[in-house]
Image (cartoon, rainbow, N blue to C red):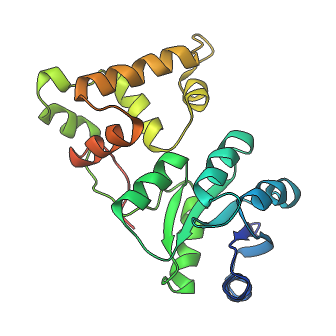
Amino acid sequence: MEKAIRVMVVDDHPSLREGLMALLRYETDIEVVGYAVDGEDALIKAVEFQPDVVLMDISMPKMNGLEATRQLRDTLPAIRVLMFTGGETPNDVLEAMLAGAAGYADKKDSVETLGIKIKAVHAGIPIFPAISSTVNTANAALNNTKKLTPTELKVLQLAVQGLSAKGMARALSTPEKDVGEKLVNTHLANIRAKWDVHNAVGMVLYAIKNGLVNIPPV
């Protein structure tokens, strides 16, 4: 028998939080191990409860869900964060991706749908509303001055997954070659220069617009 997926719920509204926890307890293969009331509390409780998946609200006092997700990705990278919000805008989805969330769920989702999304992100499947395309085909469509090198494409994909420069460096390193944060930042700067964008948000928006983000549809 497979172990149940350990889930922690983070939301500042007590009635919604308690109701959601009660409903999730009926889902097979999911164990609700605890809750947190805001982003700061989530960082503490994640260490205590060691969840596999954190269901994270975005708008909360003290520390919002995006910042809490960034810090969780740095301190407890094995935890998957499923962003849980009352609405969906392109900017919200993009910010969640950049923060390092593994997926995006709407508070209007049924419990069955939410359970599927929790199981998907736990299995390593990103769940975002997205424009999908193969990286190679999309990159070939760009003109030569904006074409990325294979390494830059890898860095871009890691950036879209929300990894920090340190996390990207770890992911790109091999036993034969150690990749440092300085080199990662150089690659990111080169991508931004090729595309004439000035920050990470602009870089990912350009990638989405040109079909460079390969994320399975919900």
Q: Where is residue 108 drawn, in percent x and y?
A: 48, 84
Looking at the rendered structure, the number of numbered marks drawn on it comes to 0
Residue that sits furthest to the top in the current view: 176
Relative depth, front residue between 14 and 104: 14
Question: Quarter holding the C terminus?
Answer: bottom left
Q: Residue at x 68, y 65 (%)?
A: 61
Q: Is residue 179 visible?
A: yes
Relative depth, front residue between 178 and 19: 19
| Quarter of the figure with residue 58 | bottom right
Q: Where is residue 87 drawn, in percent x and y?
A: 44, 75
Q: State left or right for residue 123 relative to residue 150.
A: right
Q: Where is residue 171 drawn, in percent x and y?
A: 57, 29
Q: Is residue 151 visible?
A: no
Q: State left or right for residue 125 relative to residue 35.
A: left
Residue that sits furthest to the front in the current view: 62
Q: Residue at x 19, y 25 (%)?
A: 146
Q: Where is residue 50 drawn, in percent x and y?
A: 81, 57
Question: Quarter holding the N terminus?
Answer: bottom right
Q: Residue at x 19, y 39 (%)?
A: 137
Looking at the image, is 58 positioned above or below residue 204?
A: below
| Quarter of the figure with residue 142 | top left
Q: State left or right for residue 79 relative to residue 145.
A: right
Q: Residue at x 11, y 28 (%)?
A: 143
Looking at the image, is 117 positioned above or below residue 81?
A: below
